[in-house]
Amino acid sequence: MSETPYNPLDKKNLGISVADAMLARPVSPLTPGDRFLGAGIYAIYYVGDFPSYAPVAERNHDGRFEAPIYVGKAIPLPVPVEEAAWASLPDPCCSED
């Protein structure tokens, strides 16, 4: 029986790569009212003292964040044309220069 060659573009391998990259990023607190810029993925970690979450909190202490309780994606809202960065640029076809 022959082993299938490694395919880095296989969905499973892409998912592993994305997860590894995300979990290697520094963790920062999320405070009420914080806004995200752009699209991306995020993880929420529990570090409190609620008894039912003790096994999870144990894995997320002393600067170690090993067990997110939620992983999500942020999708930016569509930007109105008049607010887009390129909307204020002069049209090169109609320039008076």
Image (tube, grey):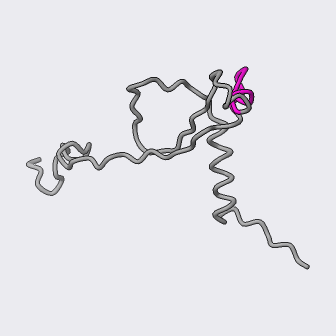
Residue nearest the observer in this picture, 81 or 61: 61
Comparing 44 with 50, the one in front is 50
Count all numbered tags in the image, as a single digit: 0
Place of residue 40 in the rendered image (x, y in percent of width and height, measured from the top left): 49, 44
Quarter holding residue 55: top right
Which residue sits at x=57%, y=38%? 43
Q: Is residue 70 above or below residue 13?
A: above
Residue plotted at (63% across, 63% down) = 11
- Which residues make up the magenta segment? 56-65
Residue 26 lies, with reference to residue 87, above or below; the image says above
Q: Is residue 48 magenta?
A: no
Q: Nearer the viewer, residue 66 or 5?
A: 66
Percent x, y of residue 79: 26, 47
Residue 49: percent from left, percent from top: 65, 21
63 magenta-colored: yes
Q: Is residue 54 left or right of residue 28?
A: right
Q: From the image, which quarter does the N terminus lie in?
A: bottom right
- Residue 39 location, x and y as percent? 43, 45
